[in-house]
Image (cartoon, helix red, strand yellow):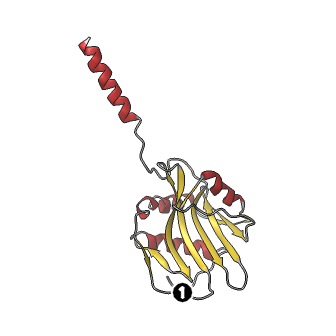
């Protein structure tokens, strides 16, 4: 009897350990969008364009989508909403190598915790371009927008050491599309 009670307790403990989840697991599965560039300009009429890089490395461009879903106040978005935005894309502007894409995306988990600082540079009527990534937040059950850098009227940067390398890569990707504006060298 005593052995069966001890065995039962050990079994419950063992099962408890196997059912633990990581609070944020990133790419436990393929996700619809890994990286995003978005440009807004409200001066002299509204402009909204950019691109989304999907799980296969396709660079999907959009221009003036009829309805665009933005993250909630905590920077989160459901899978359905992210897929909806992906469906708003009207062109495939290119493709990036999936291994390269995965290499850059693996760095996003740590970048999420980088400090965001204002560079102190401001423009007027230039609009703002934002480079970001999407990371699955298991705890929230939604995708989390991971800010990398903004450029134009508002200039901010994530100070994590890996951001500069990813931004340079994304800028090169963007320059091959007709949906990308970037000012200066930052």
Residue carrying label 1: 184
Residue 159 as seen in the image, left or right of residue 54: left
Task: Report x, y in % for residue 138.
Answer: 48, 48
> Which residue lies at the image location 70% right of the left edge and 77% below the top edge?
47
Q: Which one is nearer the viewer's eye here, 37 or 104?
A: 37
Task: Report x, y in % for residue 10.
Answer: 30, 25
Q: Is residue 62 visible?
A: yes
**Which residue of the protein is positioned furthest toward the front in this rendering?**
73
Depicted 67 relative to depicted 182: above or below: above
> Which residue lies at the image location 59% right of the left edge and 64% below the top edge?
96
Q: Is residue 178 visible?
A: no
**Which residue of the protein is positioned furthest toward the bottom in this rendering?**
124
- Helix, strand or loop for disc 1: loop
Depicted 132 relative to depicted 136: above or below: below
Depicted 142 relative to depicted 123: above or below: above
Residue 112 as seen in the image, left or right of residue 123: left
Quadrant of the rendered image containing residue 54: bottom right
For the N terminus, the image quarter is: top left
Query: How packed is label 1: few (under 14 Cα within 10 Å), some, or many (20 or more)?
Result: few
Task: Report x, y in % for residue 87.
Answer: 71, 58
Quadrant of the rendered image containing residue 158: bottom left
> Which residue lies at the image location 49% right of the left edge and 87% below the top edge?
121
> Which residue lies at the image location 35% right of the left edge and 26% below the top edge?
12
Residue 56 as seen in the image, left or right of residue 118: right
**Which residue of the protein is positioned furthest toward the top in this rendering?**
1
């Amino acid at each position: 009897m005593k052995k069966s009670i001890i065995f039962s307790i050990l079994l419950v403990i063992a099962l408890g350990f196997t059912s633990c989840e990581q609070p944020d697991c990133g790419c436990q599965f393929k996700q619809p969008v890994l990286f995003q560039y978005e440009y807004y300009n409200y001066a002299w009429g509204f402009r909204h364009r950019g691109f989304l890089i999907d799980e296969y490395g396709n660079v999907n461009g959009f221009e003036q989508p009829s309805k665009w879903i933005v993250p909630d106040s905590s920077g989160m978005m459901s899978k359905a909403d992210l897929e909806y935005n992906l469906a708003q894309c009207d062109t495939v502007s290119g493709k990036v190598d999936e291994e390269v894409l995965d290499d850059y995306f693996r760095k996003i988990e740590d970048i999420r915790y980088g400090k965001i600082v204002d560079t102190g540079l401001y423009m007027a009527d230039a609009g703002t371009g934002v480079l970001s990534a999407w990371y699955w937040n298991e705890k929230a059950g939604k995708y989390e927008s991971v800010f990398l850098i903004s450029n134009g009227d508002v200039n901010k940067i994530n100070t994590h050491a890996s951001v500069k390398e990813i931004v340079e890569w994304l800028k090169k990707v963007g320059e091959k599309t007709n949906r990308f504006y970037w000012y200066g060298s930052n």
